[in-house]
Amino acid sequence: MAEGYCYLSLIPVRSEPSGKSTMVNQLLFGDRVKILEENDSWYKIISLHDNYEGWVEKNQIETSAPVAGTQILLIDDHTATILVENCTKILLFGSEIQANDSQLIINGIKSELIAGSVTRHLDFSGENILLTGYKLMGCPYLWGGRSPFGIDCSGLVQLAFRMTGVNLPRDAWQQAEHQGEFIDLIAEARAGDIAFFDNEEGRIIHTGILTGDGYIIHASGRVRIDPVDHIGIFNRDSKGYSHKLRIIKRYNKVTETQAF
């Protein structure tokens, strides 16, 4: 099976090979994929960082391997503007780009950062996981979204861990079933622990990042902070519980980076 990567700022991944089908995910610039099959102008792909499948348009995937650098940097602002051969390219928060001695490489071409900022992977810690959540505060909710212009609850969690060099699965229920330590009581939770919430049928439908002091950062309408306790999330706006707590998990860098 051929491999490829996303060479655009952001592209939709759909449930079926049609522009009218549901967007289930998004690829950021630099995300690598394996091509599973073709259907007219579409590729069925699986993302190499989380094993998530879906359909993308062929003309939005580059099928040659990206030029490797000596290090990987991440976009650390909502957007960053890169100058590539006298043309500007806008990349989004969390996008991974190659670099040699801090010289950015975009599509194999030496490039220059002219707005925004980049960073190496942050040290793995609860505080740094929370930092991503704080940076995305107020961003709108979007089913399948993974960017500051629209993000869903599991996308927020996945992106927060990516910034610390950890790859988690894409959907909330997959993250809940993934490796990690179960935390029995919310009073024992630390900053960076992940809470999962279920519906009346017991299906995991929501997730968020615990602050360790009785609050949660999550994407519900927008990325926001709400109180959370052993019952669930108490929505400040509606003055009632919006999500019922199911489990709390704590991940570590070693096991999660080896998971895929």
Image (cartoon, rainbow, N blue to C red):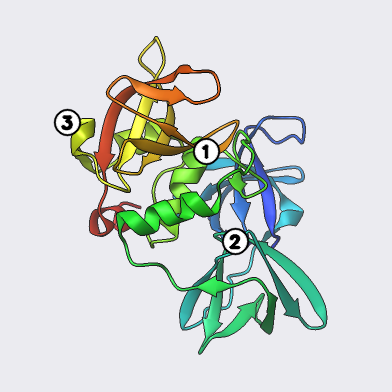
Residue 99 image position (x, y, % from top left): 54, 81
Residue 53 image position (x, y, % from top left): 53, 41
Task: Give the residue at x 33% y 67%.
Answer: 123
Q: Tell me how far mark 2 sits from mark 1, CA to CA.
A: 35 Å
Residue 146 image position (x, y, % from top left): 58, 47
Q: Residue furthest bottom?
A: 101
Residue type highlighted by circle 1:
Arg
Tell me the mark number nearer the camera, choosing from 2 and 1. 1
- Which mark sits nearer the N-terminus, 1 or 3? 3
Tell me the quarter of the picture where residue 234 sits. Answer: top left
Q: Is residue 48 visible?
A: no
Residue 166 image position (x, y, % from top left): 37, 57
Residue type highlighted by circle 2:
Gly
Q: Is residue 185 visible?
A: yes
Task: Give the residue at x 63% y 50%.
Answer: 148
In this rendered view, identify the residue nearer to me: 102 or 191. 191
Q: Relative to residue 113, is residue 177 drawn left or right? A: left
Residue type highlighted by circle 3:
Asp
- Residue 184 numbered mark, or none: 3
Residue under label 1, please give it. Answer: 224
- Residue 4 numbered mark, or none: 2
